[in-house]
Image: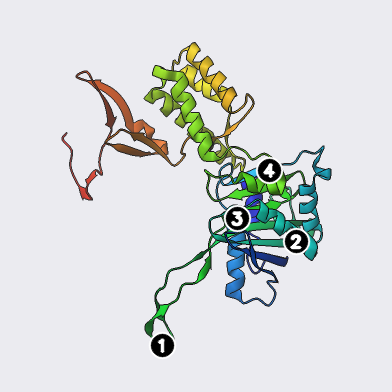
């Protein structure tokens, strides 16, 4: 799913535009024991309460593609006979109204979850009557639709005990002691099935969410999908950085890292100009082109290629935002950290002065020291 597809589904999670037919919940303690199960409907629910459920579901589709939101692919040749796929399909097709199917799913999910806190599993079913859009300008045409997209969304949220504290009682205009209480937190993981692509259902994929980009929750993914999860974003970044450091050796210069960063920023800007919602991806060949332009030796580029194939696979394309931070460019020494806007890396350069290497920052105006504007020697 691309950014545009995700945004269209996220707009469903408000009181006016959803058609959520059923919400099923299962509250579990940290020993894996079910404390309670329930079935709810947004119809007749207090507005404040309904908005909190919708906020959780919306949060499960938040974050960055390739980092928090990952595509799960099913094998077309085996998925129809796979019990995990059959279970997901049954949940969707029955709109969560079959108690036995829902209960079995909860038990399967609990067996693959390992959480320190108590947690709440939420399941919802929605039927999205996809409005027809004009091919000319993309505008919606009233009272016309192409199909109904039936899907389920699952959110797994930690439930934590708050500490006793003082709380303001508006009715009594006073502060009173507030006892500890169990509070549902933001979702740690979840998924949408099937995927929504090009404004239609894609039964060969699901969209998986993880709050922590360093933790993929492989046990959860194996239990629900029996599918391999892409390498976590933080791990991709760490491995990529290590490959550059280990294989380029003395060729791993400031100029090389700056050039790789600028290449990513150029790609992101191109996508922005094209108004494309697809993520920016880099191949090893994109990186070696940059290395060649920076004068990296052939031997070091070959070492980079070999190590890349070993760690990621020859044909693997990395999400550009997993390779470098698109929001800032950071230069760090043991004593100093320099953070620069991503589009102004030209302000930083290296130079050798009196035999010592220096990092120079051009500062024309607007310089502050401890919050005070200062002047620089001219």
**Residue 335 horizontal/vertical position (percent):** 26, 36
Residue at left offset 67%, top offset 39%: 228
Seen at 59% across and 73% down, the residue is: 49
Say whether residue 136 is visible.
no
Q: Quadrant of the C terminus?
A: top left
Q: Position of residue 320 (x, y in %)?
A: 54, 35
Q: Is disc 2 surrounded by few (<14), some (14 to 19) or many (20+) residues within 10 Å?
A: many
Disc on res. 72: 4
Q: Secondary structure at mark 1?
A: loop
**Marks 1 and 2, the one that precedes in the sequence:** 2
- Residue receiving disc 1: 172
User: Contact, CB < 8 Å: mark 1 with mark 3?
Assistant: no
- Tag 2 residue: 102
Q: Secondary structure at mark 3?
A: loop
Residues at circles 4 and 1 in contact by the CB criterion of under 8 Å: no
C-alpha gap between disc 3 and disc 2 = 20 Å
Element assignment for label 2: helix
Label 1, label 3: how far apart the Cα atoms are: 38 Å
**Relative to residue 232, is residue 248 depicted above or below?**
above
Residue 72 visible in rendering? yes
Q: Label 3: which residue? A: 60
User: Does residue 226 appear left or right of residue 373 in this picture?
Assistant: right
């Amino acid at each position: 799913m691309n950014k545009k597809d995700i945004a269209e589904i996220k707009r469903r999670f408000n009181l006016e535009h959803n058609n959520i037919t059923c919400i099923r919940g299962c509250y579990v303690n940290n020993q894996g024991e079910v404390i309670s199960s329930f079935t709810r409907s947004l119809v007749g629910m207090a507005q404040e309460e309904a908005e909190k459920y919708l906020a959780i579901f919306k949060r499960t589709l938040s974050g960055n593609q390739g980092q928090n939101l990952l595509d799960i692919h099913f094998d077309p040749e085996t998925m129809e006979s796979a019990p995990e796929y059959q279970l997901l399909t049954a949940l969707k097709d029955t709109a969560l109204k079959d108690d036995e199917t829902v209960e079995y799913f909860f038990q399967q999910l609990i067996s693959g979850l390992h959480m320190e806190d108590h947690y709440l599993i939420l399941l919802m079913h929605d039927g999205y009557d996809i409005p027809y859009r004009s091919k000319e300008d993309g505008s919606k045409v009233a009272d016309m639709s192409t199909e109904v997209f039936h899907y389920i969304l699952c959110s797994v949220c930690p439930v934590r005990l708050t500490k006793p504290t003082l709380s303001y009682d508006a009715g009594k205009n006073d502060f009173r002691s507030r006892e500890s209480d169990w509070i549902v937190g933001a979702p740690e993981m979840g998924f949408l099935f099937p995927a929504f692509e090009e404004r239609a259902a894609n039964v060969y994929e699901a969209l998986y969410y993880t709050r922590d980009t360093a933790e993929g929750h492989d046990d959860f993914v194996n239990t629900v999908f029996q599918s391999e999860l892409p390498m976590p974003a933080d791990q991709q970044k760490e491995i990529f950085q290590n490959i550059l450091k280990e294989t380029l050796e003395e060729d791993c210069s400031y100029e090389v890292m700056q050039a790789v960063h600028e290449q990513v920023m150029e790609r992101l800007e191109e996508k922005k100009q094209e108004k494309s919602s697809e993520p920016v991806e880099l191949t090893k060949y994109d990186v070696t082109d940059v290395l060649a332009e920076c004068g990296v030796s052939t031997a070091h580029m070959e070492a980079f290629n070999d190590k890349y194939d070993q760690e990621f696979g020859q044909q693997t394309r990395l999400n550009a935002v997993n390779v470098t931070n698109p929001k800032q460019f950071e230069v760090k020494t043991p004593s100093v950290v320099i953070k620069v806007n991503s589009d102004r890396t030209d302000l930083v350069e290296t130079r050798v002065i009196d035999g010592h290497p220096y990092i120079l920052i051009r500062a024309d105006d607007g310089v502050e020291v401890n919050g005070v504007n200062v002047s620089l020697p001219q």
